[in-house]
């Protein structure tokens, strides 16, 4: 009995063997908006919480930028910016988040995460792009060009759906695009990007991992099985999971 107790203490209170309990991964969903506030944030957060409960991922959420400290962030394996807008972090909070990513952690950006922190180049390179414009919500065809990634392997080669489609005014280098939008399938309006118009991508950046999906403006997105699986795959990538 003493040997079992000693082993229990040495392993940090985790029993090894057939009765071992694996520690869940943990994410922080950040929903602060300084500019436009997306109505679907509520539905998006509920969907991420449900995905977490179904996949052994613990989910915390906040609109409080004060949570971006070294001490608080270290408990999370990834941070999700859910349709954040504007200047959401001050200089001290930005520095803490940079250190967090450099420690090998993950980032997920959803929809308006690219409409965030235009004056913080490090963040621009992390999320991968900055929003430029968008036309009215409409149906469009997405071309899934990489169907090997966790976020896309379940998707059809052509994915038709309705959403708000961003045109980007700037994009980072060395991104790994997963999904492009076919501008011939809808009216992209002012700021059209032509044949090379990515909508989702991933990359390793500054010691960490980042995934971004432009999809997710509408409330209906968070009831859509294909989209939810796409989002879950991106979260798993950011967490460093392989399946």
Image (tube, rainbow, N blue to C red):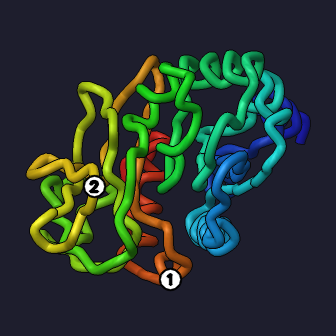
Residue under label 1, please give it.
220
Relative image position of residue 218 (x, y in whole percent): 50, 75
**Residue with the most extreme front position:** 190
109 up-or-down from 126: above or below: below
Q: Residues within 10 Å of mark 2 (few under 14, many from 20)?
A: few
Relative image position of residue 88 (x, y in whole percent): 70, 37
Hey, which quadrant is residue 129 in on the image? top left
**2 or 1: mark nearer the eye:** 2
Q: Kindly identify the residue that appears in the image at 49 percent across and 67 percent down.
A: 217
Relative image position of residue 77 (x, y in whole percent): 61, 38
Identify the element where label 1 is drawn: helix
Relative image position of residue 91 (x, y in whole percent): 73, 17
Residue under label 2, please give it.
190
240 vs 57, left or right, is left
Pointers 2 and 1 in contact (C-beta within 8 Å): no
Residue 23 visible in the displayed image: no
Q: Residues within 10 Å of mark 1 (few under 14, many from 20)?
A: some
Q: Which residue is more in the foreground, 164 or 238? A: 164
């Amino acid at each position: 009995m003493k040997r079992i107790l000693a082993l229990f203490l040495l392993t940090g209170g985790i029993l090894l063997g057939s009765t071992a309990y694996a520690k869940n991964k943990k994410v922080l969903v950040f929903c602060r908006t300084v500019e436009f506030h997306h109505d679907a944030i509520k539905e998006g957060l509920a969907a991420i919480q449900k995905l977490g409960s179904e996949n052994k991922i613990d989910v915390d959420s906040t609109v409080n930028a004060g949570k971006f400290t070294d001490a608080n962030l270290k408990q999370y394996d990834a941070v999700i910016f859910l349709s954040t807008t504007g200047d959401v972090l001050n200089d001290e909070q930005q520095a803490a988040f940079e250190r967090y990513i450099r420690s090998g952690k993950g980032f997920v950006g959803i929809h308006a995460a690219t409409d965030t922190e235009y004056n913080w180049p490090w963040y621009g390179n992390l999320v991968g792009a900055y929003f430029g414009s968008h036309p009215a919500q409409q149906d469009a065809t997405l071309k899934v060009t990489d169907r090997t990634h966790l976020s896309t392997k379940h998707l059809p080669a052509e994915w038709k759906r309705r959403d708000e489609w961003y045109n980007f005014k700037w994009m980072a280098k060395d991104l790994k695009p997963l999904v492009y939008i076919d501008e011939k399938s809808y009216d992209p309006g002012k700021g059209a990007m032509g044949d090379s118009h990515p909508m989702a991508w991933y990359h390793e950046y500054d010691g960490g991992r980042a995934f971004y999906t432009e999809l997710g403006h509408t409330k209906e997105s968070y009831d859509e099985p294909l989209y939810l699986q796409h989002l879950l795959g991106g979260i798993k990538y950011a967490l460093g999971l392989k399946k």
